[in-house]
Amino acid sequence: MTDTARARKLADRIRVVVAETLQRRIKDPRLGFVTITDARVTGDLREASVFYTVHGDETAREASAAALESAKGILRSTVGRETGVRFTPTLTFVLDAIPDTARHLDDLLVKARAQDAEVRSVAVGKSFAGEADPYRKPGEYDDVDGEGSLDADDEAEDE
């Protein structure tokens, strides 16, 4: 096994090499606006997962996935040449779920803001139940027994 620092460095280098190769060398018309977001390498440096996003709809995603699969051999040989490792890792392309997750979180935040605004509109002009300040303050009651608490005799004297 190798250390994780070496695997991280190799993953970063693979990400850069794949992105540059897609930009400069791959001329597949199916390849849409693809962004390489991350790469991860296993501990034995044999397999690499390359995460990507595609700007566009579902057909653009499918076409870009097919283009990446067909260019996998060229990309792997370029990675091997650029990194100089003994065994070039096999590349697996994974569509990154971060944009979909971010969109879902934005929708949830909009929903929460709407519910907060509804609660605020209902609360306008309302007051709290009970007294304005429900807590006892020191010195309000006479502490006759010196224990710091009121007992039945103290309450009877207050009335």
Image: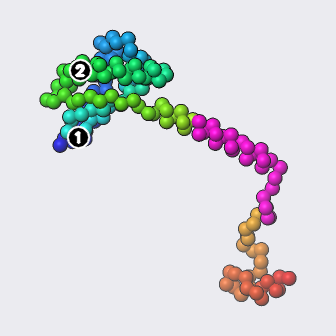
Which amino acid lies under the numbered mark 1 shown in the image of this protein?
Answer: Gly
Q: Are the two marked residues, 1 and 2, in contact with CB atoms closer than 8 angstroms?
A: no
Name the residue: 29% across, 19% down: 70
Residue 6 location, x and y as percent? 23, 36
Q: Does the magenta stretch include residue 101?
A: no
Q: Give the range drawn in magenta.
A: 107-132
Question: Cα distance, mark 1 to mark 2?
Answer: 22 Å
Q: Foreground mark, 1 or 2? A: 2
Vertical side of 44 occupied by 123: above or below: below
Name which residue lies at 83% across and 49% down. Answer: 125
**Quadrant location of the N terminus in the rendered image:** top left
Using residue 83 as the reference point, say whether residue 130 is left or right of it. Answer: right
- Compared to residue 72, the image places residue 41 above or below, namely below
Q: Residue at x 34, y 18 (%)?
A: 67
- Judged left or right of residue 39, residue 134 is right
- The residue tagged 1 is 43
- Confirm whether the magenta stretch covers residue 114: yes
Look at the image and tell me whether residue 55 can be seen: no
Q: In which quarter of the image is residue 147?
A: bottom right
**Residue at 82% from the left image edge and 86% from the top image edge:** 156
Q: Is residue 159 visible?
A: yes
Disc sitting over residue 73 in the figure: 2
In primary-sequence order, the first of circles 1 and 2 is 1
Judging depth in this view, the residue of 35 and 156 nearest the camera is: 35
Position in image of residue 133 (x %, y %)? 76, 63
For the residue labelled by badge 2, is the local secondary structure a helix, a strand or a loop?
A: helix
Nearest the viewer among 9 and 122 is 122
**Callout 2 crowding tier (Cα within 10 Å): few <14, some 14–19, many ≥20:** few
Amino acid type of disc 2? Gly
Position of residue 16 measured from the top left corner of the image (x, y, whole percent): 31, 24
